[in-house]
Amino acid sequence: MTLYQTTFDIFNRNYMGSAAMAVIGQSCLGGAAAMYVLANGTSILQMIQLGIIVLACVFANTSILAQMKHKVVFNLIMLSASLSLFFILLNSFIL
């Protein structure tokens, strides 16, 4: 079984607790990513990055509140966390 499938199975079995923890975790990670982006200024490039981070976090949180299918929720949480980590690393080391 792949790592993705194993992680999704755990998430699916404990959906209510996992979803609650995911809201807290990915929102905090999104906030940290926003902080790293804004630490480099407020140019149009930073505003685009900030918009991407905010939209990813909003979509993940909305999917949980809208009670979408568990697979959709899981994928949006993974996308949000991945984008936040990417922008943290991008703004820490490259920009």
Image: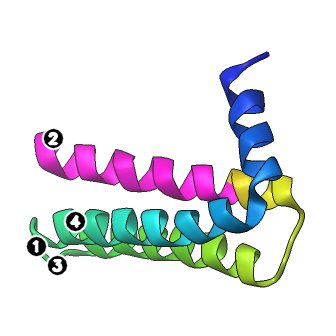
> The N terminus lies in which quarter of the figure?
top right
- Classify 75 as above or below 22: above
Q: Look at the image and say whether residue 90 sits in the magenta stretch.
A: yes
- Residue type at mark 4: give it: Val
Q: Are marks 1 and 3 in contact (CB under 8 Å)?
A: yes
Counting from the top left corner in percent of width and height, residue 71 is at 83, 52
Label 2 secondary element? helix
Residue, disc 2: 94
- Residue type at mark 3: give it: Thr
Dot 4, how many residues are within 10 Å of its Cα: few (below 14), some (14-19), or many (20+)? many
- Residue type at mark 1: give it: Gly
Q: Which numbered disc, 4 or 1, marks the residue closer to the eye?
A: 4
* Frontmost residue, 1 versus 88: 1
Nearer-N-terminus badge (1/2): 1
Residue, disc 4: 37
As measured in the structure, the alpha-carbon distance from the residue carrying label 1 to the one carrying label 3 is 4 Å
Label 3 secondary element? loop
Question: Quarter-wise, where is residue 43 in the image?
Answer: bottom left
Looking at this view, name the residue that lies furthest to the top.
Answer: 1
Residue, disc 1: 41
Residue, disc 3: 42
Nearer-N-terminus badge (4/3): 4
